[in-house]
Image: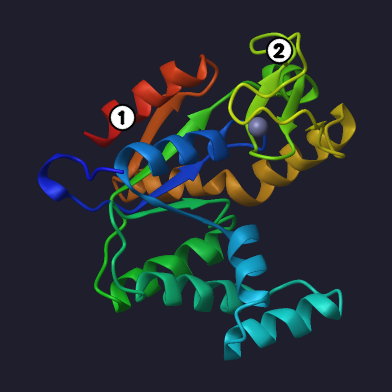
């Protein structure tokens, strides 16, 4: 892993509807710019087993089947931001999801003396998302993403990345549940597009292209 030219550290948010490919692009940025991906799900899983005070709270809440509050998630992000060497910076993937969370994140960054550099909005048409997500599967071992149309699982049934032979389709990869998740995105999260636009942070990329093309657009947006 190498740091980008100029040794710059950037904190960015990847914003976009479910299935837009935020996770895939975050992985590319992680590899190419030594950035650290902060995904809420990963942080919660990690916290649960960490044994820290906040980790115990997370475990309690999740064991009771309750939703983890914004305050807890912000606490976990705070630990990461204050955790020392952060390489190329942080990629927020899946957080913030609401205006309240965006405000809380902004306040936290101010508090710890960091800035949010750019918000990348990945624009993808709904119908294209439905077509894409229903065609998608991932390698169970390494998470490599395959697509029935654009990147089918190799004929020998082995992952090109790790050689694994078990592939999963997400349980919620069906049209109805995606449309429900899209509706939640438009209601709760899409107001963030205007929010960050008003702050002069927003850059939009066409999320419909091939993975490399989208990565190229993001690279340009960050330079
Ligand atoms: Zn694999």
Residue at image position (82%, 40%) is 180
Instruction: Residue 5 in the image: state x and y as whole percent.
Output: 14, 39
Q: CA distance from mark 2 to mark 1?
A: 29 Å
| Mark closer to the chain start, 2 or 1 | 2
Determine if the C-beta at disc 1 is less than 8 A from ligand 1: no
Q: Quadrant of the C terminus?
A: top left
Q: Quadrant of the N terminus?
A: top left
Residue 14: which numbered mark, if any? none
Relative to residue 178, is residue 117 drawn left or right? Answer: left
Residue at image position (58%, 65%) is 43
**Res 11 quadrant in image:** bottom left
Query: Compared with residue 118, is residue 122 higher up or lower down, i.e. above or below?
Result: above
Query: Compared with residue 125, is residue 170 higher up or lower down, i.e. above or below?
Result: below
Instruction: Residue 151 in the image: state x and y as whole percent.
Output: 65, 13
| Residue farthest toward the left in the current orientation of the protein | 6
Q: Ligand 1 appears in which quadrant?
A: top right
Residue at image position (31%, 78%) is 111
| Residue placed under numbered mark 1 in the picture | 219
Residue at image position (80%, 23%) is 134
Residue 154: which numbered mark, if any? 2
Label 1 secondary element: helix
Relative to residue 19, is residue 22 drawn left or right? Answer: left
**Res 39 quadrant in image:** bottom right
């Amino acid at each position: 892993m190498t740091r980008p030219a100029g040794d710059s550290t950037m904190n960015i948010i990847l914003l976009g509807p479910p299935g837009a490919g935020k996770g895939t692009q975050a992985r590319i940025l992680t590899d190419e710019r030594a950035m650290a991906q902060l995904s809420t799900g990963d942080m919660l899983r990690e916290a649960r087993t960490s044994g820290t005070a906040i980790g115990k709270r997370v475990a309690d809440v999740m064991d009771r089947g309750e939703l983890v509050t914004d305050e807890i998630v912000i606490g976990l992000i705070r630990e990461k931001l204050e955790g020392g060497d952060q390489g190329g910076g942080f990629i927020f993937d899946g957080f913030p999801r609401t205006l309240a969370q965006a405000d809380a994140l902004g306040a936290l960054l101010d508090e710890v003396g960091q800035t949010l550099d750019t918000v990348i909005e990945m624009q993808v048409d709904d119908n294209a998302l439905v077509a894409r997500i229903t065609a998608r599967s991932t390698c169970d071992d390494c998470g490599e993403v395959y697509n029935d149309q654009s990147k089918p699982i190799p004929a020998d049934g082995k992952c090109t990345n790790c050689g694994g032979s078990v592939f999963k389709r997400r349980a919620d990869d069906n049209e109805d549940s995606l449309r429900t998740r899209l509706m939640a995105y438009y209601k709760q999260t899409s107001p963030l597009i205007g929010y960050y636009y008003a702050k002069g942070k927003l850059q939009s990329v066409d999320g419909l292209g091939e993975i490399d093309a989208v990565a190229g657009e993001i690279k340009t947006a960050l330079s």
